[in-house]
Each structure stands twice: as C-alpha cells, then as structure tokens.
Image (cartoon, rainbow, N blue to C red):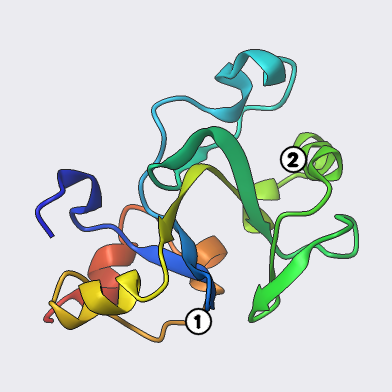
Amino acid sequence: MEDPNFDKVVIAICELNTKGAMGFVINKPYTRSFNELVEFGNCKAFILYEGGPVENESLYFIHRRPDIIDHSVLIADGNYLGGNFKQAVAHINSAVHPEADIKLFIGYCGWDPGQLDAEIAEGSWMVTNAMLTLVLEKNANTIWNDLYAGQ
C-alpha cells in the first residue's frame, strides 16, 4: 500500500460482515491526549490513538470492562467495542491503570464489502491471527515488530 498513513500500522479488525469491515489502528498514538480535547479538559491525561481516517472527529473505544460499561458489543477474547461513553470516561478518571482496560481512538478504518479481501489478495496487508488481547496488552511502539518481524 502506497499510503504513508498505513506504513507499519497494526489494525485490529472489529467487525467483518456483508456490509464490509471496520477496525482501528492500534499502534499510532494521536498528537494530543484525551484531556487536551476541549470537551474533556477536566479529565485525567490519557493516551489517544489515531484509529483511522474515517470519521476522525469522533471517539471510539475498545475495552474489557463490560461489568462497568453498559451496552458494549463483544468482539473477541474478552474485548468489547463501545458502550456507554460516560461510564468509560468515569473509569478512565477513577481507575489507577485505566490503560489496562480501555483504548481510545479518534476515527476508524473502514472497507466496503469485498474491499479488504481484495486489498489482502493484492498484497497490501499482512494478516496475522493474533489474539485481540494484544490491543490492550502490547506496547504500541513495539507491536508491529513483535507481530511481523521476519515476514
């Protein structure tokens, strides 16, 4: 792929169906932190990630706390997509290590039906069947090398 926005990125695919695919870049920190966004200036400093080029004025999140964040959708491996954002923010502000439970994204990556499969077939993407738990457990600075070194 010739797009520099996707150079050495790791994308977690969260949805894949007849309507297309949706996921997040999990290893590209955003230039500002959560509390630097005007509407969240009273929140704890928390890292944001550039989730992708689609709807990049909206926030999304993956978490592993369905016990305190309502209306989440199970993705895989005990990880959930979205839910009650106010509850997620409350957890970020009150937890000692909220980064172990939640990852925030600005924007997402999206593909039309068949588009992702076509890009994979043409060699634009390297695919791995890594556990989704890596989204919250691996260091964003090293995850690409951890997954793809030697490929």
Using residue 73 as the reference point, say whether residue 46 is left or right of it.
left
Residue 37 visible in rendering: yes
Look at the image and tell me whether residue 126 can be seen: no
User: Which disc is residue 92 wearing?
Assistant: 2
Q: Residue at x 24, y 77 (%)?
A: 118
Residue in view at x 9 percent, y 53 percent: 2
In this rendering, the answer to whether 42 lies above or below 116 is: above
Residue type highlighted by circle 2? Ile
What residue is shown at x 64% (from left), y 50% (from top)? 61
What amino acid type should be assigned to the residue bearing mark 1? Met
Quick check: 56 above or below 37?
A: below
Residue 14 in which image quadrant: bottom right
Image quarter of the C terminus: bottom left
Dot 2, crowdedness within 10 Å: few (<14), some or many (≥20)? many
- In this orientation, which residue lies closer to the viewer: 69 or 108? 108
Which residue is pictured at 37% across the width and 53% down the height?
27
Task: Report how far apart the C-alphas of labels 1 and 2 lie in the structure.
Answer: 24 Å
Left or right placement of residue 25 versus residue 69 in this view? left
Q: Which residue is mark 1?
A: 131
**Sequence-wise first label, 1 or 2:** 2
Estimate the x, y position of residue 21 in percent, counting from the top left.
47, 68
Q: Secondary structure at mark 2?
A: helix
Residue at the farthest bottom position: 129
Name the spot of residue 110 as percent of width and height, x first: 43, 57
The number of discs equals 2
Q: Quick check: marks 1 and 2 in contact, CB under 8 Å?
A: no
Percent coordinates x, y for residue 4 in the rendering: 15, 45
